[in-house]
Image (cartoon, rainbow, N blue to C red):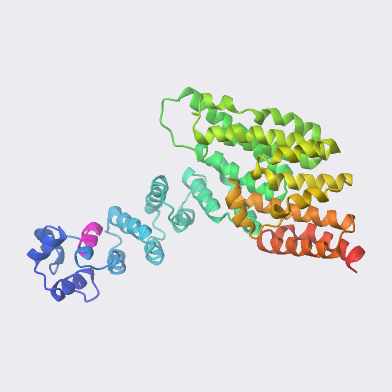
Amino acid sequence: MTNPRSVRYELKTELVRQGYTLSSFSKISGVNRGVLSSTLSDPPTKSLSMNQLNQMSEALHLPVGWLYKQYAEELIKDIEHVSWRKVKDLLTHCLILNKVSLIKMMLDALEDKTAYVNYIFELAEEVIEQGSQADLQMFYQYVLDYESNPHTERFAVSQYRLFRANLGLDLQQNFKAMIQFAPYRHTLPLYLKLDALAQLIHVSYALKDWEVLNEYGKELVNTANLAYKEKSKQSHISTKKHERPLIVYFGKGYTAQFIKWEHSGNYEEAKKLIPYYEDLSWVTKVDPLDTESRISVEKHAIYAKCNRYNLELLQGNYSALKPYVDYLEFFPEEHPASLTIIIKASNMHKWDIDEILEKYHHIIYPSNILDYLQRITSYSMIVEINRYINIYYELALYYFERKKNKDDLEHILSVLKSNIEKYNRLYSFDSTQLFEKISKFYLA
């Protein structure tokens, strides 16, 4: 007798309820009558496929996914004998419909079955290659849980995919994700290592870990050089594509090294790095000059000019301030990064920049930082949010040192505190020192 919870029972019941015979239902569903007979007979002589189930559900005017839970339960009951193709079909359809609980149920049923590790990994990578935005974290966690050799490439790739999935605007969470992933970057295939190092640079910058930032910068340039050489030798061979043009990785690697020297106060060493990213058009010899590459070449030329101005200001050249501000009129995307340095330099050299702060008041205090940044910049949100925190930190020092209006100072402290709590709790040590200093000498 047919199990009253089975897929076949539910289908047969619905056919009868809607008044179909096998012949009439075959015509409207497009499923062969013989297939219907063999899959719905008791006992069945043929297994039901996902496509057939979806066809029948559609013909019965029931939602896709109507009987997925029962279908999954039947596969699990006979999991030792079910083919990977059937499991894959179900998981794929569950991803499309975001049926997270069913995916978890299937993966739990496959626990300790090491033969499935590579199947699960390849399915997840296949979904990514198709450009899907599906959440694949459970798949990659399955690989990490049941891969017997943690030194394999698929283990490293799974670590990387989870690292990327866990990156957000909370720096504490990003720090944990970086610590978990970083040791596995060396095992990644070249095209993913480029992307991985770029993300590690973003997190390191936000953490203000300049030494680590510098090391990742050097490593990214070396990795980009390897990719460049591969493309030079095998430009006619189709290979897996890295996420961004090679120009981006060269530029990010060199600017990471520049930032290390800039923040360490070694401005001469920082200056030596600018020519390396000032003109990256040579990279297009092996990496075609598409729209993104062309824009990246132009952007790095802008970065170079801004960074030359930054070094002039940090070294006390006040005469560079006006031409710098005039230059920035044309590049709103650079405003957060440039304002950080302008305010920092004014604190270092006791300059009055009230007029500039008034000019950029709407940029310093957008009604919603995330909305503003998403409109004006293509940079990493991790980096840009933390630039704003740096702006507020330097601005608080600026107001304190000049004994500005108490309301202005209290406002900037409130904004700084709010953004640290939202995005960067790891900044608390620096900000605590600032708050104590101001409380003791000014707000008491």
Residue 398 spot, x, y in % from top left: 84, 53
Q: Which is more toward the observer, 270 or 100? A: 270
Please give left or right for residue 25 compared with residue 179 in the image: left
Q: Nearer the viewer, residue 218 or 433?
A: 433
Residue under the image location 82 percent in, 51 percent down: 354
Q: Percent x, y for residue 91?
A: 35, 58
Report the quarter where the N terminus lies: bottom left
Image height check: is 14 above or below 222? below
Percent coordinates x, y for residue 281 in the rendering: 58, 26
Q: Which secondary structure is most common in the magenta stretch?
A: helix
Question: Does residue 54 belong to the magenta stretch?
Answer: yes
Q: Which residues are magenta?
A: 48-56
Q: Total of numbered circles in the picture?
A: 0
Q: Is residue 248 found left or right of 68 in the rendered image?
A: right
Say whether residue 387 is left or right of residue 354: left
Query: Which sits in the foreground, 411 or 60?
Result: 411
